[in-house]
Amino acid sequence: RHLNHQPALVGTVSIEKSEHLSDLMKNRPYWRKRMKEWIQRIKEEAPKSKLDSGQAGELDSFLSRKEALTADEVQEWVEKIAKANDETLAYLVSRLGETVQIIETMQRGLEFNVLNAKFHQREAEIVAQAGRPGAITIATNMAGRGTDIVLGGNAEKMIEDELAKLPEDTPEDQIKKIKDRIHEECRKGREIVLEAGGLMIIGTERHESRRIDNQLRGRSGRQGDPGVSRFYLSLEDDLMRLFGGERMKKVAERLGMEDGEVIEAKLVTRSIRKAQKKVEDRNFEIRKYVIKYDDVMNKQREVIYKLRN
């Protein structure tokens, strides 16, 4: 699927698959191949009158080149003709530009930590680092609950980890220097994070219960710190698909919206709330009947206890 330009997004349920996918996405020959495919398509489909001889010549040189094609070179060409008046050419060039941006992002690389039940022994360490500038932490709903993410980094935890690496006979003045250095790093890091707006929470789906959503939101903006949360959903998510997703799809189609286009409207929020309410009501009914069955067992237990007494 990956080589058919349909990369799959894998959640934290399978870390091994996520890491394998990351390796594939960083594969430079693959992205160079994608660039050449878009360049070939521009050459075939773009109206000839919209490209001068120099621009067309550059396209040919990109395609015929045997050595590696770099994102910077293609980006320079894209910027030259990005303001083309022709709709077809503008679309093709914009798609090539998107590919170039992905390549640049992958080449820079995004370091991240994963916080889930599989790595519970590292939970304290990961949470301690989650508030540092530029830190990315992928977390499940359950992992890290009840822990404050300290902006700039948790100095005490970092000091503890640093001192654990030192021999027992380390001089006190060296230990003091390490503590002072880490406290200063965390102080500067906190200033950077505060200036950037605090901790940002990005949710990739809404839970069946609003309580869980609120717990996720509550990981930022704690103890008076600034923070923001934002959810990115799909009409194909289980919650939307089961409760109202088809209706929303029809509305989007009537409005002429394309697949992948962003929908930001109160109608979406209301649909999600209604869906969550239906699920919560259903779960409440299930719990209610479970209690009724448990009452039967409880009465039998009471009879046995009386006989024993």
Image (tube, rainbow, N blue to C red):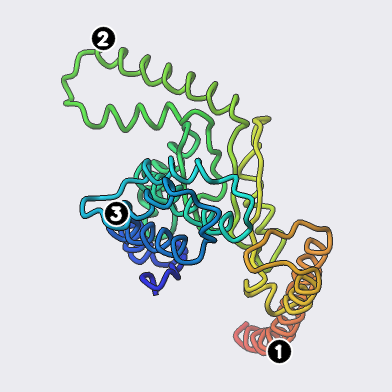
Q: Mark 2 sits on what residue?
A: 173
Q: Quadrant of residue 307?
A: bottom right
User: Residue 220: percent from the left, percent from the top?
Assistant: 62, 40
| Nearest to N terminus: mark 2 or mark 1 | 2
Marks 2/1: CA distance?
Answer: 68 Å
Judging by the rendered image, the residue that carries numbered circle 3 is 28
Quarter of the figure with residue 277: bottom right
Q: Name the residue: 29% across, 49% down.
A: 69
Residue named by callout 1: 296
Locate the C terminus by quadrant: bottom right
Q: CA distance from mark 3 to mark 1?
A: 65 Å
**Image location (x, y in percent) of residue 157:** 40, 32
Task: Report the side of 87 relative to 126 (left or right).
Answer: right
Q: Residue furthest top?
A: 173
Residue 88: give x, y in percent of width and height: 59, 61
Amino acid under disc 3: Arg
Which one is in front in this view, the residue at disc 3 or the one at disc 1?
3
In the shown orientation, is residue 16 left or right of residue 239? left
Give the residue at x 58% y 59%: 204
* Label 3 Cα crowd, 10 Å radius (few <14 / some 14-19 / many 20+): some
**Which of the pair 215/40 is nearer the observer?**
40
Q: Nearer the viewer, residue 56 or 40?
A: 56
